[in-house]
Image (cartoon, rainbow, N blue to C red):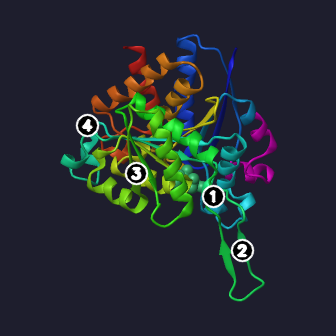
Amino acid sequence: MTKKILILPGDGIGQEVTKSAVEVLNFVTEKFNLAFSITSLEVGGTAYDKCGSPIPDEVLKSAKEADAVLFGAVGGPKWDQLEWDDRPENALLTLRKELNLFANLRPAFLFDELSGASPLKESVIKGLDILIVRELTGGIYFGEPRGVIDDVKPNYAFNTMIYNEDEITRIAKVAFESAQKRKGKLCSVEKANVLEVSKFWRSIVTEMSADYPDVELSHQLADNTAMQLVLNPNQFDVIVASNLFGDILSDIAATLTGSIGMLPSASLDSSFKGMYEPCHGSAPDIAGKNIANPIAMIASLSMALRYSLNAEAISDKIDAAIKKFVQNGYRTIDIATDDNFLNTSEVSKKIINIIENE
Ligand code: IPM
Ligand code: MG
């Protein structure tokens, strides 16, 4: 059956990097005779400006029908003063929740050639290859009750960090299975020394480990993991964490590579439909200049082909082309060491060229 792809470029550099990735998508679709139906719609601040909602009904409807959503980035100072419902970020959280995208895979890896871009010493960072599995539709992001109470003194605000056993089991399953396909190590991260919800999380993950004798399970407290990621990041293979801890730790891990413009992510439901986004944001400061690095978006497209679109062989080709791109010394402004760098639209042309000539 024809697989459906929805393209949501969003705001800022989301527009440019998505355009680049779509060029690669169109190229592989034609070259390898793939049958995709591709639709593109506006989302985020751009959609709000046009029709008064960051996530118009049509976007939600098309996203629910799609096998894979390619999401650029949303947000910008222009929309910062809006109420939450109208803010571009609401589009992201609504899509995650409405599409049941509970499993967020955030790889952080370092090409040897880019070791110098990392803020850490080469001896510490060399060979970095971590996968963070972040729970994405539960925890404190969505927990009820939540609110602001402003009719008593002092006023207060509160959120609820809550997980039920099914939510923990399904994300841990993804993490154990990912570890089985990698180096067989899983570190589960929480704050079991303080929080009931974390103690509960730890007990469920521990119980499940009996079913995965080939995976070496460890537990860490989130503050320690933040420190360990910087001190000795190569101790990690797969990390599994709740929505909030995964949010924080994945930013640290991405920063270690020195090039957040290179890192993709996948958010999957239980049947492997998914939304794919670069780890970076909309970068309003460089938007419209054609200098953003589109590799993270192109790598996100590759993840979409692998997980949701049944085209693993094509995904391998794109990943190999990205590797070759870096090995051949091509750079974008974020990872360049001199003035010699390609602009956004030149990158997709190079990647296409590498795939064509392999
Ligand atoms: C992320 C972002 C989002 C999050 C924001 C933009 C709502 O930081 O995808 O990591 O907190 O999940
Ligand atoms: Mg984040």
Residue at the image position 52 percent from the left and 64 percent from the top:
195
Dot 1 amino acid type: Ile
Determine which quarter of the picture holds residue 321. Answer: top left
* Location of residue 258 with respect to 36 vertically, above or below: below
Q: Amino acid at mark 3?
A: His
Q: Amino acid at mark 2?
A: Val
Say which of 349 and 33 sits in front.
Answer: 33
Q: Give the magenta-colored segment's residue range.
A: 44-62
Of mark 1 and mark 4, the one earlier in the sequence is 4
- Mark toward the start of the polypeptide (1 vs 2): 2
Q: Which mark is residue 162?
A: 1
Q: Which residue is mark 4?
A: 113
- Pick the residue in front: 69 or 153: 153
**Secondary structure beneath disc 1?**
loop
* Image depth: mark 2 or mark 3 in front: 3
Residue corresponding to mark 2: 148
Q: Secondary structure at mark 2?
A: strand
